[in-house]
Amino acid sequence: MKFSTYLEKISGVSVYPLISLLMFVAFFAIVTIWMYSINKTEIERIEKLPLEGNED
Amino acid sequence: MNLDKFSYDNKLPRLFAIACIFWGATGMLLGVIAAFQLAFPILNFSEYFPHLTFGRLRPVHTNAVIFAFVGNAIFTGVYYSIPRLLKTPMWSEKLGKIHFWGWQFIIVCAAVSLLMGFTTGKEYAELEWPIDIMITLIWVVFGFNMFGTILTRRERHLYVAIWFFIGSWVTVALLHIVNSFEIPVSFMKSYSWYAGVQDALVQWWYGHNAVAFFLTTPFLGLMYYFLPKAADRPVYSYRLSIVHFWSLIFLYIWAGPHHLLYTALPDWAQSLGTVFSIMLILPSWGGMLNGLFTLRGAWDKVREDPVLKFFVVAVTCYGMSTFEGPMMSLKNVNAISHYSDWTVAHVHIGALGWNGFLAFGMMYWLIPRLYKTKLYSVKLASTHFWIGTLGILLYAIPMYWSAFRSYFMMKAFTPEGQLQYEFIDIVQTIIPFYIMRAVGGTIFLIGVFIMIYNLIKTAKAGVFQTQEDAEAAPLTKAYRAPSNAIWHSFLERKPLLLLTLSLLVVGIGGIVEMVPTFLVKENIPTISSVKPYSPLELQGRDIYIREGCYNCHSQMIRPFRYEVKRYGEYSKAGEYVYDHPFQWGSKRTGPDLARIGGKYGDAWHFNHMLEPTSMAPGSIMPSYPSLFENNIEINSTRSKIHAMRKMGVPYPDGYEAIANNDLQKQAKEIAYKLKKDNDISIPNNKEILAIIAYLQRVGKDIKLEKH
């Protein structure tokens, strides 16, 4: 017996991967937009944070 | 502007660094021993030390490398970088000390208890419930200290490395708690709350994300801090690192089911795992390229600086394993790789290359700075680099080779339709590869000892700087973010929001996978012939778990012609409903045991446990003479049955009180039959009878249904 046959009882199980994909795409889009909204001079300051104290 | 004066503590980073190197060498040494045991079973010494057999040693090796070596490396980096990135000392030195000593105490308890056979039988989560509770407490202490520091910081922005630390902290907490739901039956013995398919899903949701959020994301934090520092230039793209962070933590949590392809796990969950695993290539490679591109225009430095050499290979190995992983999640590839040495090679590219080399690079950078001196010998460090690289290659290549070789042998049929090779033939052709792998591991370990020598010499040449003075302006309360940075300022001011968001992001994946799988419980057709284990079988099963049989034997037959022909009818989800914990295994060094019941006679098992080669010439299984001496622990039967009943295993009411009668009756029957049919004498109370009872039961319920 195939497992999918009795798993059909979870109504619309095929929608799970689809919802997951949509959620990720939306999430990814938000992060990307947010990232580009960061001001460039601020980025340049932040990315140097680990370098403080580098004397050599 | 008033500048606050304060100092960064170096004592804790140093302590964690020492612990990291010490446990690293120990864990790798255990790995080398275990590797040689596979090639030369006599090295199990099971007649003298039943505690050192492969089945018990291997979990100590994996736990030591993951939680002791990598764990202490993470803490070294965290306690060094967070204060410097936030311009404030760690919030509490006392909590830091509790964290350090607590973690080391846990490691010692873990090693001792695993060798003694106290194990939950779930890979990388083998530690028993009292240790699980200790881990939770110490993890909370660590979290308090980290968030205390973040909340009292003098740098408004949280550098991306800290995001990785926060994301890792919260997810590991979630994973550990959910996977460790277990019902104690005694001090140091418990049963997983989940059974069968559910247990498998939760375990690999945990197992995969232990790789993700313990071995990967915190180390990415280290990469984003130490790589720019060592190269003396900012990360290639800070924006990319943010996308890397969020997409990685979002995607990783879904990928667990790829460890269960072709098993009895529902198809939709398997597909979900595959899809998200493939998607993982993008953020992983984004991160890898971000690391490598940081070195643009500085490749001349890589030629001279051993720290950068280690980092380059580490990041490359990260890229290799994060490409290989998704490939292995494709069902057709997984058919070859699963249960084989391929998985072993894959994880060691990650563990030796990514974790090992990144940690080594960090140590070569850090120790001279803690002691305010130069590295004792750059040349020795370069030697270590080359030896280590050679070690990785010599480890991995034989394992890949052996995986393909065994796959082709496993599925070879004669023209008459019979399997061409016995399992033992395949084992025999693999042994040379096991030897090469063990040699590769040894070479890698020699490199580690060279590093230890080099670092000790370095420390001796310098003076330990207990602290480092610094000054910075405090944060102003009336800060207003620039108008074009709304989103950014929103998060940067609220680290707790960042924590909550991370939890939410990883939570979604977990929930979407878990909830239906717990619904599946109602949907798994009850196979009427599947019955709970008899008390003797249950005791036998606990011996099976104690001896770590699952490290080499699976109990999950995939629906392939060559597996069904070799092992028997493929496994069904409904067969495992009483298995607390599930014992599907992940590696077949020995054959699958899902249908072992009734395949051989009791005397075969009796002799096989005493001396495996007597029944299976050429076998590399250790012998288990202690099973013939130890008495079955009948005192625990009552609480074991009680715990099982509490979890819904349908033993009759009040059965715990009389279970031992049935246990003794069944043991007596097996002993009597051994005497009668084979003239073997064994007292009625020895453990061997319980393990025989269990093995003769495994997978038989379904065969009964056919009659």
Image: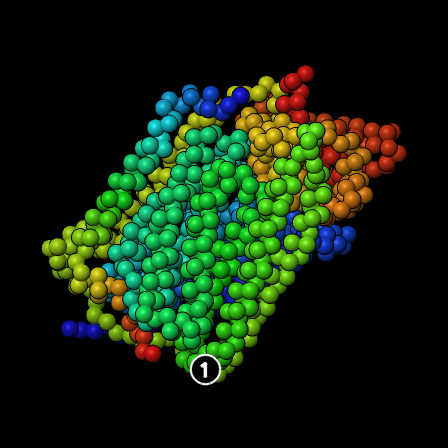
- Quick one: B162 or B326, which is closer to the camera? B326
Please give the name of the residue rendered at 51% of the width and 23% of the height, measured from the top-left corner: A2
Which residue sits furthest top?
Answer: B707
Q: Say which amino acid is labelled 1.
A: Gly
- Quick one: B434 or B657, which is closer to the camera? B434
In percent of width and height, residue B625 lies at 77, 46
Picture layout, residue B126 above or below residue B95: above
Which residue sits furthest left?
Answer: B483
Picture layout, residue B599 above or below residue A49: above
Q: Residues within 10 Å of mark 1 (few under 14, many from 20)?
A: some
Q: How was this image coloured?
A: rainbow
Please give the name of the residue rendered at 56% of the width and 73% of the height, measured from the top-left corner: B450
Q: Secondary structure at mark 1?
A: loop
Residue B15 can be seen in this image: yes
- Quick one: B359 or B162, which is closer to the camera? B359
Q: Quadrant of the C terminus of chain B?
A: top right
